Image (cartoon, rainbow, N blue to C red):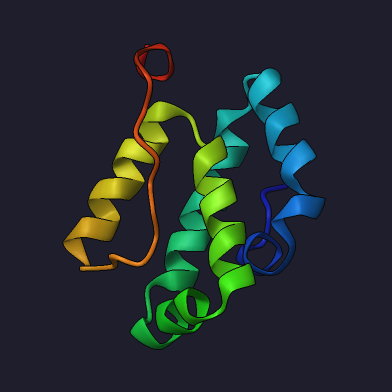
Amino acid sequence: MPLLPTSIVQDYAAYRGIVRGWLQRDRKDLVLASLDALKKYLQPQRTYDAVIANDDYRENVQAFIADLPADQARSLKQWLKERDFNGLHVPRLSVRQQR
């Protein structure tokens, strides 16, 4: 079962091991489903603004983003750019992450 977006936003540290376990077991489908749920959650400007305004929430979302596989991180970066959601940082991908 994918993570709820509120779990990512409010307390990602408690779920980070689960996400990393999914990635180790090649369960990218669960990570992608969690990402899709997070994007739907952030879609309303008011919700996005509230997450960005709260340092803990923003850091939780950015930690989740940092754990994403390269293809999902690139996709999210484009999604954020299309919406002018500039308050979240998608880390640069190393050459190794891009493979």
Answer above or below: position of 59 versus 95.
Answer: below
Residue 77 % position (x, y): 30, 48
Answer above or below: position of 19 versus 71.
Answer: below
Task: Judge left or right: residue 40 versus residue 33.
Answer: left
Q: Residue at x 51, y 61 (%)?
A: 38
Q: Nearer the viewer, residue 23 or 53?
A: 53
Q: Residue at x 56, y 79 (%)?
A: 54
Q: Quadrant of residue 29?
A: top right
Q: Nearer the viewer, residue 92 or 23?
A: 92
Residue 92 % position (x, y): 34, 34
Give the farthest residue toward the front.
55
Q: Quadrant of residue 39?
A: bottom left
Task: Judge left or right: residue 64 versus residue 91.
Answer: right
Q: Nearer the viewer, residue 33 or 45?
A: 45
Residue 93 % position (x, y): 36, 28
Q: Residue at x 77, y 39 (%)?
A: 18
Point out the image quarter for the C terminus. Answer: top left
Answer above or below: position of 87 versus 97.
Answer: below
Residue 60 % position (x, y): 62, 59
Give the farthest residue toward the bottom.
46
Task: Judge left or right: residue 30 versus residue 96.
Answer: right
Task: Judge left or right: residue 59 versus residue 13.
Answer: left
Answer above or below: position of 26 versus 58.
Answer: above
Q: Residue at x 39, y 60 (%)?
A: 88
